[in-house]
Image (spheres, helix red, strand yellow):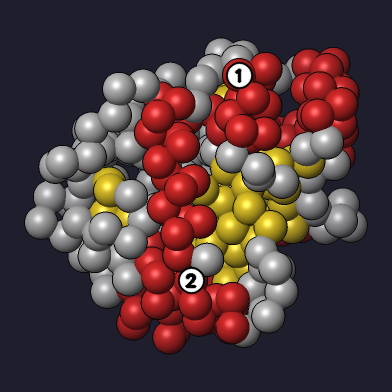
């Protein structure tokens, strides 16, 4: 069994990259899955800003494991996909500068109340085109299961990963719980295609996010199985306190409940540290 490398969405500790670096070092992490930096979404920053961030991370001995992009989080009926491909091209440039070998992405918001099956062919066509744009870059497109998108349930994630084999899978237990999906069943179906995990947990009763191991996501069991089969990369995604950029992560009208029940923290740093500690307790 490999010793896992642990990364984090450090923007949940604070908006500024200097603060994020402090949080990662304090928790002895290897680096970050970069999502928001200095008040901007990662996919919107300039190439020069990316170089500045890279210098700071290099100086701190940290790496960028993955670009936590919002790619694929557009309305499949209404939004401009050609502009989205331009955003992918820019994100590939950013990933190269930051030294990231992975880009986290999604499979498009499905209009609320409509059957995802009606959009399957369009989703697959778009994902094939995204794979073509990234081909030869040395940077992998990694699909994350998420509520509101086509790839929300295990069966639809399996469909995408089978039909677009260039994609790698990211397994997020909390997101499956929020879709009513049993995570052990999801793992059994998807385990051969999972490249890395997001460490996040949630409760079926109200979809609230709780520290890993305290919810219904069977995080401990899935994590153990992931590591046993040679998995070695984990990203802590706390979602235990409201943070800058949270509202931009969901389909219009959806709302995450963070820090459910007894899990209330005095600061974003406290919530971030608690999420890291919850993972360490399972390793």
Q: x, y (%) of residue 225?
A: 50, 81
Residue 41 versus residue 261 in the image, above or below:
above
Q: CA distance from mark 2 to mark 1?
A: 28 Å
Q: Earlier in the sequence, mark 2 or mark 1?
A: 1
Tell me the residue that label 1 is attached to: 19
Camera-side residue: 112 or 145? 145
Q: x, y (%) of residue 77?
A: 39, 43
Classify residue 91 by image quadrant: top right
Query: For the residue labelled by badge 1, is the local secondary structure a helix, a strand or a loop?
Result: helix
Residue 84 in view, yes or no:
no
Residue 63 versus residue 230 in the image, above or below:
above
Q: Which residue corresponds to the image point at 30% horizontal and 22% vertical from the top-left?
A: 266
Quadrant (top left, top right, bottom left, bottom right) of the N terminus = bottom right
Tell me the residue that label 2 is attached to: 223
Query: For the residue labelled by badge 2, is the local secondary structure a helix, a strand or a loop?
Result: helix
Q: Is residue 260 left or right of residue 28?
A: left
Residue 243 in view, yes or no:
yes
Q: x, y (%) of residue 22?
A: 64, 25
Q: Which residue corresponds to the image point at 78% horizontal and 41% vertical from the top-left?
A: 63
Q: Which residue corresponds to the image point at 32% horizontal and 71% vertical from the top-left?
A: 218
Camera-side residue: 247 or 208? 208
Q: Is residue 56 left or right of residue 38?
A: right
Q: x, y (%) of residue 171?
A: 49, 64
């Amino acid at each position: 069994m490999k010793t896992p490398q642990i990364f984090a969405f450090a923007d949940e500790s604070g908006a500024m990259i200097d603060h994020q670096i402090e949080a990662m070092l304090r928790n002895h992490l290897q680096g970050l899955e970069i999502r928001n930096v200095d008040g901007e979404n990662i996919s919107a920053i300039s190439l020069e800003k990316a170089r500045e961030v890279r210098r700071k991370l290099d100086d701190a001995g940290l790496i960028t494991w993955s670009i936590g992009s919002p790619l694929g989080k557009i309305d499949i009926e209404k939004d401009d996909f050609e502009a989205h491909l331009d955003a992918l091209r820019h994100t590939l440039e950013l990933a190269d500068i930051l030294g990231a070998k992975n880009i986290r992405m999604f499979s498009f918001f499905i209009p609320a109340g409509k059957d995802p099956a009606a959009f399957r062919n369009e989703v697959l066509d778009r994902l094939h085109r995204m794979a073509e744009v990234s081909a030869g870059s040395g940077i992998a497109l990694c699909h994350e299961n998420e509520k509101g998108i086509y790839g929300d349930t295990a069966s639809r994630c399996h469909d995408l990963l089978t039909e677009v084999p260039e994609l790698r899978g990211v397994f997020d237990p909390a997101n499956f719980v929020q879709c009513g999906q049993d995570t052990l069943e999801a793992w059994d179906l998807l385990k051969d295609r999972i490249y890395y995990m997001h460490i996040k947990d949630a409760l079926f009763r109200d979809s609230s996010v709780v520290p890993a191991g305290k919810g219904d996501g069977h995080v401990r069991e899935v994590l153990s199985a992931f590591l046993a089969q040679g998995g070695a990369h984990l990203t802590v995604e706390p979602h235990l306190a409201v943070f800058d950029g949270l509202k931009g992560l969901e389909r219009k009208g959806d709302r995450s409940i963070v820090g459910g029940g007894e899990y209330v923290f005095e600061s974003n740093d406290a919530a971030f540290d608690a999420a890291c500690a919850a993972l360490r307790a399972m390793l």
